[in-house]
Image (cartoon, rainbow, N blue to C red):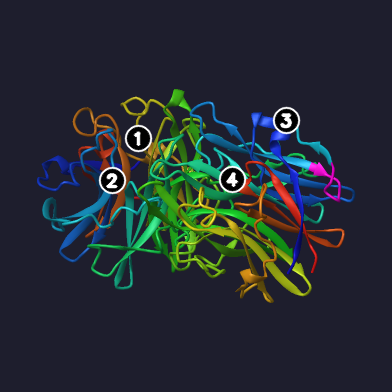
């Protein structure tokens, strides 16, 4: 596989964002229209109560060659949850799915904890205005913890194949005590299916992508595309600790393929995209999103500092 | 109206010495019957930590079947360990409900974690015992068996496990909102249910079973279902949404009945038990548990401060129908 990098296409510091957000344009994910592409991302407001971050969803509309910004969302795309709900402190990321005449969103909602920093679950929302705004159905999640997936269910990515909704997502396996970084989380990629997009059947604690680093490898944000008679999955992975500062331990992009959506072969050697020598994606690559647009296959991704300074795009060459 | 004759308090945690994890509270009694004794599970607490925060454990006391006021044994250890870091039951296992499954005993319990914007969240876990309910191994790798969903966003607690006609029924509560209450949030929760063929995979009914009579912010708990005389009887407790830690707005015991467990008719006027004029249950009564023993029907329940000083016993006079 070979990707041609087209460079960074959006840097949040160059724009005024809704919800008092500054910096961060994380986990870009698309909704493709006839004459433009809407790219959703998560950006951050500083919580006036305590200086912590609140993640909000915004979007940018771009031309289909990704060279020009047409507009940026000026209003709230989806509200954060009410007091005590799973998405009270942030939505990051959001996955958008066209389902016949509907536009669906699967969100990763964040709420803060005391003994660990955070808990997440997957939410569900619907748009009736072509993705300008989304309304949640209920106040709770559609996918959350279960006996063998004890915490940190999130990063859901949904595709509809045949009449079945397939969700790839991550679930936490451990909170590891560390001396200098507090409690560090580890998580793996799982798979669930549904006939209606709301009621999901998990494989319940089954890690579908093997580790290449070690048992504490953290795998995040799976994204899947069907192309040339095969299912291709991209994701990012890192070491459980030391990943913020050390580029050798930080996020990079991994790859796996499958013929049947059941068995996945991990094949990072074939990922076809690496850190740049210098610049915005020279120390880290994360939060990939693969999609088709006018018969081409594209890969959106974040660079250094988890997307603090935006996202770039690559196009599949072979 | 049913008529319950109060027999008095049967367990006072403050009278138990030398157990560090059992200093106060004996909440949510639930019985498991043996030939010679009645094992009563309850939830209790060690002294609070330096910040005044409690954890809770579940344990049991064995009472003489012929004389429920005679304690013959107390658990040596809590029946569950607290969960590991970041899990749903890291800070408490309360309350617990018990059922026999073949030669094993199953426990369903609410696990507590601590949150930043609200004080806690709760989800329901399960454990299995191979030694007559003395200790339980938790199901799974640290996660709950019943967790949040679109219409049950938080605080899934108070499980009561039952089995009728080869199907398991789990009655429980689910939070519907947190009242902000000037920075001291309080949860509102309502009685719900789910059913299962194996006791592990659950289908939620996804509806409130019991109408509220104190308004939208009424909190309902301890949905204790008892089948008798061809009818399902539910005793439960309910309170006001705020200022409920005193007599006026604190817990009282309510009653509902049903033919199918889905449609319930609330009629608190039939509950037949209320706070006493004075004494340990003069301010509130809560967490009822009804059971049949040797031809008699009993209710165990909590008194003031939601069981801080133990639980008592009442005996039904007349029929439950």
Marks 4/3: CA–CA distance: 20 Å
Q: Quadrant of residue B282?
A: top left
Label 3 sits on residue: A16
Per the rendered image, the range of residues in magenta is: A61-68
Numbered mark located on residue B252 in the image: 1
Say whether residue A220 is left or right of residue B120.
right
Task: Name the chain under label 3.
Answer: A
Please check whether the numbered discs 2 and 3 fall on a single chain.
Answer: no
The spot of residue A59 in percent (x, y) is 74, 41
Residue at 15% across / 64% down in the picture?
B36
Looking at the rendered image, the disc whose residue lies closer to the viewer, 2 or 4, is 4
Marks 2/3: CA–CA distance: 49 Å
Please check whether the numbered discs 3 and 1 fall on a single chain.
Answer: no
Residues B138 and B225: in front is B138
Q: Can residue A162 be seen in the rendering of this structure?
A: no
Q: Residues within 10 Å of mark 2 (few under 14, many from 20)?
A: many
Q: Are marks 2 and 3 in contact (CB under 8 Å)?
A: no
Regarding mark 4 in the picture, which secondary structure is present there? helix
Q: Is residue A261 above or below residue B188?
A: below
Task: Name the chain under label 4.
Answer: A
Q: Quadrant of residue A175?
A: bottom left
């Amino acid at each position: 596989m070979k990707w041609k990098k087209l460079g960074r296409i959006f840097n949040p510091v160059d724009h005024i964002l809704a919800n008092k957000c500054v910096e961060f344009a994380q986990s870009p994910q698309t909704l493709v229209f006839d004459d433009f592409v809407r790219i959703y991302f998560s950006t951050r407001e500083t919580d006036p109560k305590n200086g912590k971050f609140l993640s909000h969803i915004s979007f940018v509309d771009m031309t289909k060659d990704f060279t020009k910004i047409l507009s940026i969302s000026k209003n709230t795309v989806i509200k954060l949850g009410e007091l005590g709900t799973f998405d009270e402190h942030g939505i990051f990321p959001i996955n958008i799915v066209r389902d016949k005449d509907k536009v669906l969103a699967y969100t990763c909602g964040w709420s803060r904890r005391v003994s660990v920093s955070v808990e997440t679950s997957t939410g569900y929302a619907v748009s009736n205005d072509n993705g300008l705004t989304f309304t949640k159905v209920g106040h709770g999640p559609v996918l959350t913890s279960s006996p063998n997936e004890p915490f940190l269910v999130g990063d859901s990515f949904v595709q509809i194949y045949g009449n079945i909704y397939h969700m790839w997502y991550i679930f936490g396996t451990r909170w590891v005590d560390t001396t200098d970084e507090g409690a560090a989380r580890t998580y793996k990629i799982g798979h669930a299916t549904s006939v209606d997009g709301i009621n999901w059947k998990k494989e319940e604690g089954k890690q579908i992508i093997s580790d290449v680093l070690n048992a504490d490898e953290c795998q995040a944000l799976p994204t899947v595309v069907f192309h040339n008679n095969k299912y291709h999955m991209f994701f990012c992975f890192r070491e459980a600790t030391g990943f913020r500062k050390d580029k050798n331990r930080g996020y990079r992009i991994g790859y796996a393929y499958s013929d049947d959506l059941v068995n996945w072969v991990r094949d990072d050697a074939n990922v076809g995209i690496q850190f740049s020598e210098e610049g915005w994606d020279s120390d880290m690559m994360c939060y990939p999103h693969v999609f088709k647009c006018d018969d081409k296959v594209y890969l959106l991704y974040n660079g250094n500092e988890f997307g603090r300074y935006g996202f770039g795009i690559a196009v599949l060459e072979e | 109206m049913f008529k319950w004759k109060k027999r008095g308090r049967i367990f006072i945690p403050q009278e138990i010495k030398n157990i560090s994890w059992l200093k106060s509270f004996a909440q949510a009694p639930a019985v498991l019957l043996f030939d010679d004794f009645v094992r009563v599970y309850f939830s209790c607490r060690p002294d609070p930590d330096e910040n005044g925060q409690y954890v809770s454990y579940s344990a049991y006391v064995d009472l003489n079947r012929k004389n429920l006021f005679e304690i013959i044994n107390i658990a040596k250890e809590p029946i569950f360990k607290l969960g590991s870091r970041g899990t749903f039951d890291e800070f408490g296992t309360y309350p617990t409900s018990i059922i026999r499954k073949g030669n094993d005993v199953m426990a369903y319990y609410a696990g507590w974690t601590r949150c930043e914007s609200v004080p806690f969240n709760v989800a329901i876990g399960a454990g299995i015992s191979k030694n007559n309910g003395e200790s339980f191994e938790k199901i799974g790798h640290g996660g709950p068996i019943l967790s949040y969903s679109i219409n049950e966003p938080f605080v899934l607690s108070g499980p009561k496990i039952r089995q009728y006609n080869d199907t398991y029924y789990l009655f429980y509560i689910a939070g519907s909102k947190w009242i902000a209450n000037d920075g001291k949030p309080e949860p509102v929760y309502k009685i719900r249910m789910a059913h299962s063929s194996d006791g592990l995979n659950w289908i939620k009914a996804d509806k409130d079973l019991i109408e509220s009579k104190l308004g939208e912010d009424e909190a309902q708990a301890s949905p204790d279902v008892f089948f008798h005389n061809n009818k399902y009887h539910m005793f439960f407790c309910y309170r006001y949404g705020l200022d409920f830690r005193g007599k006026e707005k604190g817990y009282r015991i309510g009653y509902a009945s049903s033919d199918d467990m889905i449609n319930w008719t609330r009629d608190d006027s039939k509950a037949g038990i209320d706070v006493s004029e004075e004494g340990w249950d003069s301010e509130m009564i809560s967490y009822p548990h009804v059971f049949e023993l040797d031809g008699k029907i009993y209710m165990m329940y909590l008194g003031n401060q939601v069981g801080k000083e133990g639980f008592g016993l009442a005996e039904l006079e007349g029929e439950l129908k």
